[in-house]
Image: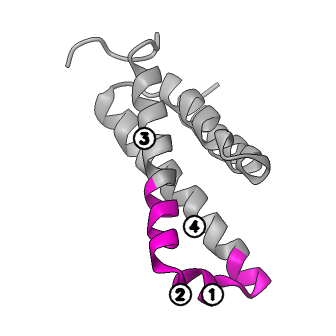
């Protein structure tokens, strides 16, 4: 199977699991980092996954009519964005070091 299809499936799995628990972001990042070729790609995939999940969360809040109230709690919205990005990026980078798909020269 193509590597990019597996990375896209890990994005969807992370989104589905993060609905239940925030650890879904870590699990999705671990899977996406496993299929990344190098450190830069793992970093980019981690940021993309973090923004993807945060964007889906914002869309859900907008659908429920709670987006304005959530954004009014400005420290909470910033913390949730940072946590989403940090969890996704760190999990993709850590797994990339142990991946057989990764190119071993930095």
Residue 50, horizontal then vertical, whole percent: 50, 52
Residue 63, horizontal then vertical, whole percent: 76, 82
Q: Distance between the residues labelled 1 and 2?
A: 5 Å
Mark nearest the camera among 4 and 1 is 1
Q: What stretch is highlighted in magenta?
A: 61-82
Mark nearest the camera among 3 and 1 is 1
Q: In this view, does 58 lie to the left or right of 103?
A: right
Q: In this view, does 65 lie above or below 32?
A: below
Tell whether position 13 is magenta. no
Q: Which of the marked residues, 4 or 2, is nearer the chain's N terminus?
A: 4
Q: Is residue 67 above or below residue 75?
A: below
- Observer-nearest residue: 86 or 79? 79
Q: Which of the marked residues, 3 or 1, is nearer the chain's N terminus?
A: 1
Does the residue at mark 4 contact the one at mark 1 (Cβ under 8 Å)?
no
Secondary structure at badge 3 equals helix
Secondary structure at badge 1 equals helix
Q: How far apart are marks 4 and 2 (CA)?
A: 17 Å
Residue 52, horizontal then vertical, whole percent: 55, 58
Q: Label 3: which residue?
A: 89
Q: Label 4: which residue?
A: 55
Q: Label 2: which residue?
A: 72
Q: Label 1: which residue?
A: 69
Secondary structure at badge 4 equals helix
Mark nearest the camera among 3 and 2 is 2
Residue drawn at x 79%, y 48% as measured from the top left: 20
Q: Which of the marked residues, 3 or 2, is nearer the chain's N terminus?
A: 2
Q: Which of the marked residues, 4 or 1, is nearer the chain's N terminus?
A: 4
Q: Distance between the residues labelled 3 and 2?
A: 27 Å
Q: How many numbered marks are there?
A: 4
């Amino acid at each position: 199977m193509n590597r990019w299809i597996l990375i896209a499936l890990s994005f969807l799995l992370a989104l589905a699991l993060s609905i239940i628990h925030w650890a879904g972001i870590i699990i999705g990042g671990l899977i996406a980092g496993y299929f990344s070729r190098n450190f830069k790609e793992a970093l980019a995939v981690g940021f993309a996954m973090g923004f993807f999940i945060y964007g889906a969360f914002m869309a859900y809040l907008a659908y429920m009519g709670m987006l304005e109230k959530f954004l009014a709690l400005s420290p909470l919205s910033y913390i949730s964005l940072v946590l989403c990005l940090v969890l996704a990026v760190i999990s993709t980078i850590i797994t990339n070091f142990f991946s057989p798909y990764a190119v071993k020269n930095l």
